[in-house]
Amino acid sequence: MIKTVFEISKMDCPSEENLIRIKLADKDGIEQLSFDIPGRQLTVYHQGEAEEINKALTELNLGSRMISSEAGTLMVTEEQGNQRKLLWTVLAINFAFFVIEMTTGLISRSMGLVADSLDMLADAFVYGISLMAVGKSLTRKKTVARIAGYFQITLAIIGFMEVLRRFTGEGEIPDFTTMIVVSFFALIANSVCLYLLQKSKSREEAHMKASLIFTSNDVIINLGVIVAGTLVLILESGIPDLVIGTIVFGLVIQGAIRILKLGK
């Protein structure tokens, strides 16, 4: 068994991790991938030479560099079943709040809530693709990634068009109460996710670290929508809602492009 360590300078969120996982999924001899996102390192346990793996990582343009390659022992992943249950829980929470925020966002005319709902959907897609990658064919993984990416981009573009219409139109003022209340509950949901991930015995492993980073970003976005709702109340203007909506739609498109790369 060979243990090869790579530095991935542009790997800073779960999207890059999933991109790498699917890129290497069809490489023979790979036994296990271990990600250290904060340290921007990937450890590959494999049979045979590391050159093909190095070449595949270079094609992703994520700033990869092979640090070392030596004989090693396969790392044993503990509580794998508990990790999967935890990731399914996080996925379910994200999808549920996608539905809640999309519905209330449309009713309250808040682009911030609509955009945040798409961010929740993007998270659910990433978790789903990661879970589906286990024991599934490469073709199916790529197909799911493409469908998810195009769906997100389509929704985000529609959202951008609506934001532009409101900027140039009558300037509808959203229901700030709904914005603040729903975002507050979304904040609680994501805080629960953070708590569950942080108390997990596997929190230092790659997938758990990735999930922590992703959920931490969600908390920041929830706070942003709450602040925007408060500004709508104070300023009696829909502009803060449109601004936060534009920012989050941009993040959704960025995530969708990364997901599309998984389908190549």
Image (tube, rainbow, N blue to C red):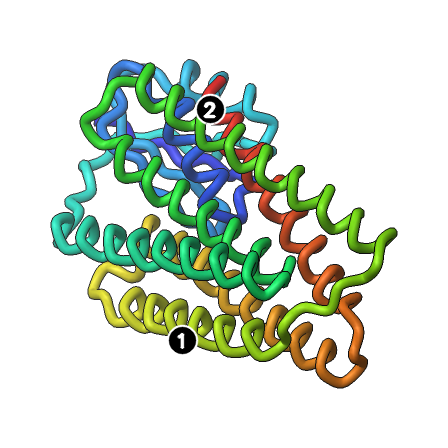
Coordinates of residue 90 in the picture (x, y in percent): 31, 57
- For image coordinates 41% across by 20% down, the residue present is 53
Horizontal side of residue 16 vs 144, given as left or right? right
Disc 1 element: helix
- The CA distance from mark 1 to mark 2 is 31 Å
Disc 2 element: helix
Which residue carries the number 2 mark?
A: 146
- For image coordinates 61% across by 69% down, the residue present is 225
The one nearer the camera, 169 or 225, is 169
**Which callout, 1 or 2, points at the residue further toward the start of the chain?**
2
Instruction: Classify 172 as above or below 211.
Output: below
Q: State the image quarter where residue 74 is shown.
A: top left
Instruction: Locate the N terminus and report the quarter of the image it occupies.
Output: top left
Asked if labels 2 and 1 touch by Cβ distance under 8 angstroms, the answer is no
The one nearer the camera, 33 or 217, is 217
Coordinates of residue 209 in the picture (x, y in percent): 38, 56
Q: Residues within 10 Å of mark 1 (few under 14, many from 20)?
A: some
- In the rendered structure, find residue 188 and report the number of the disc placed on it: 1
Coordinates of residue 126 in the picture (x, y in percent): 40, 42
Which amino acid type corresponds to the residue marked 1 in the rendered image?
Ile
The one nearer the camera, 217 or 233, is 233
Which amino acid type corresponds to the residue marked 2 in the rendered image?
Arg
The one nearer the camera, 131 or 253, is 253
